Amino acid sequence: MIVATLNVNSIRMRLDAVLEWLAENEPDVLALQETKVPDDKFPLAEFEELGWQVAIHGQKSYNGVALVSRHPIANVRTGFGDPLFPEDCRLLAAEVEGVTILNTYVPNGTAVGTDKFAYKLAWLDRFLVYLRAHVDPGAPAVWLGDMNIAPTQDDVWGSPKHEGKIGRHKEELARLEALLAWGWTDLFRKFTQGPGHYTFWDYVIPRSFENNLGWRIDHIYGTAPVASACSRCEIDPSLRQAPKPSDHTAVVARLISS
DNA sequence: ATGGTTGGCATCCAA
């Protein structure tokens, strides 16, 4: 089973690139973030005509997550089911081929000290509560998406200039650590060590991709049975190289067991 | 100290 994640930064802008990538890479599941489209305007038919099944959870202008799968998508759950987090389309959970898939678009946080940063921390706390309620760390499960956190200094360019800022603040790192302690393994780091492996290159920095001024903030995590069976996890930079790209590219993992 | 880019939507917000 091949699973992948991609922050598309508007599915409507990236539709052709995503469909082409699906045809070339033939994953079993692709998790999308920042679809930026309400559900009634999502280009469902374009996927379904090509045989893909799609689960969507979107809103106008911002956020939005979706799952694309060649297999049936069962037991779809969107959001936390919590009145404290009502409108924000950042979480879609489902089962595909017996594997629990959790697709998240973790809040960016904007800047340390802002209400949005406080919301990022609260969201991460709420996600741990959600995991404890809904997911078994001993069963096959994958958590993937745009986490908006670089786990180590190796995961961001120009270190240590970003230390203590969003994506590298101790409060969010502590929450990521708590989530990993619940039972997740970073599948990319099972195979590849060291700096310079990124999934996001900021549009704002001129030639950020060409100069590899990036961040590794898109992750695929697996529970113990998934991590032990995972035979490959790689970043595919091709989408960020294409014309009119998203600012992120895809991460792909091969899970042997299912 | 600050700017630079992109997408969606509305003449700015979020990233």
Image: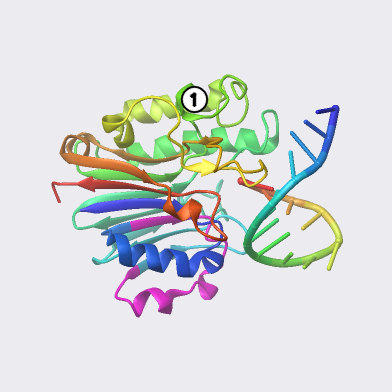
Residue A135 in view, yes or no? no
| Callout 1 amino acid | Leu
Residue A51: horizontal and vertical position, in percent? Answer: 29, 75
Mark 1: few, some, or many residues within 10 Å (few <14, many ≥20)? some
**Residue at (49%, 51%) from the top-left corner?**
A240
A6 w.r.t. A181: above or below = below
Q: Which residue is mark 1?
A: A173
Residue farthest to the left?
Answer: A257
Chain ID of residue with mark 1: A
Q: Secondary structure at mark 1?
A: helix
Residue A241 pos. (x, y %): 49, 53
Magenta stretch: give its range: A30-53
Q: Is residue A136 above or below residue A258?
A: above
* Side of A46 relative to A211 (left or right): left
- The foreground one among A190 and A207 is A207
Residue at the spot 39% in from the left edge and 67% down from the top edge: A20
Q: Is residue A224 magenta?
A: no
